[in-house]
Image: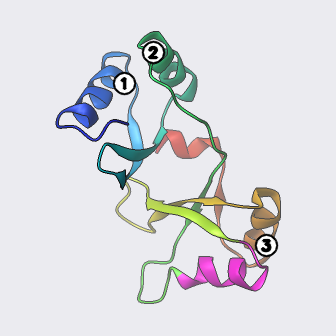
């Protein structure tokens, strides 16, 4: 996304007008003129249609939504099994709207292997029902 005042607001407005709720977001500065915006929404198809209709380019990445223990070091309950299996966590950001047992969104380099490893290590991996929390 162009790194300009109001662009993120415009994205939120476009999705909001179509009834799409942003459930997780990560914005990172890439260059003076661009930022990388990652979002998880409650209705991916509707979001894609809204972005296409406005000529906004996007790429889709499969991600995991995992429950993270809410205590010091709790994030490592998720990250250590991935590290031990040589799986790289590429992008990590919080899920919005849940007070207990936080949910973390993770883009990894081997999603199927990561899912298996986390399930084997008793980490709750959410399915698409996470969109409706």
**How crowded is the residue under tag 1: few (<14 C-alpha within 10 Å), some, or many (20+)?**
many
Residue drawn at point x = 26 percent, y = 26 percent:
10
Cα gap from disc 2 to disc 1, whole angstroms:
13 Å
Q: Are marks 1 and 3 in contact (CB under 8 Å)?
A: no
- Which residue position holds label 2? 55
Mark closest to the chain's N terminus, 1 or 3: 1
Q: Are marks 2 and 1 in contact (CB under 8 Å)?
A: no
Residue drawn at point x = 50 percent, y = 26 percent:
57
In the rendered view, would you say 80 is above or below 100?
Answer: below
User: Which secondary structure is most common in the magenta stretch?
Assistant: helix
Query: Which of pointers 1 and 3 indicates the residue nearer the eye?
Result: 1
Give the farthest residue toward the bottom: 72
Q: Residue 132 at what x, y percent from top left? A: 49, 39
Residue drawn at point x = 77 percent, y = 78 percent:
86
What is the tally of numbered marks visible in this picture? 3
The magenta region covers 76-87
**How crowded is the residue under tag 3: few (<14 C-alpha within 10 Å), some, or many (20+)?**
some
- Which residue position holds label 3? 117
Q: How is the structure coloured here?
A: rainbow
**How crowded is the residue under tag 2: few (<14 C-alpha within 10 Å), some, or many (20+)?**
few
Query: Residue 2, located in which quarter of the rendered image?
Result: top left
- Which residue position holds label 1? 15
Q: Residue 44 at what x, y percent from top left? A: 55, 29
Q: Residue 55 at what x, y percent from top left? A: 45, 15
Query: Residue 111, located in which quarter of the rendered image?
Result: bottom right
Relative placement, left or right, of 38 versus 108 is: left
Asked whether 41 or 99 is in front, the reply is 41
Cα gap from disc 3 to disc 2, whole angstroms:
38 Å
């Amino acid at each position: 996304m162009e790194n300009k005042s109001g662009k993120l607001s415009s994205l939120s407005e476009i999705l909001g007008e179509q009834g799409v709720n942003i459930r997780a977001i990560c914005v990172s500065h890439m260059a003076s003129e661009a930022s990388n915006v990652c979002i998880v929404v409650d209705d991916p198809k509707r979001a894609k249609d809204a972005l296409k209709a406005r000529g906004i380019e996007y790429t889709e990445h499969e991600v995991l939504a995992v429950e993270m223990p809410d205590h010091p070091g709790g994030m490592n309950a998720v990250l250590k099994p991935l590290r031990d299996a040589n799986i790289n966590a590429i992008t990590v950001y919080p899920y919005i709207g849940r007070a207990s047992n936080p949910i973390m969104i993770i883009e990894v380099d081997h999603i199927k292997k990561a899912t298996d490893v986390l399930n084997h290590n008793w980490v709750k991996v959410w399915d698409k029902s996470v969109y409706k929390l």
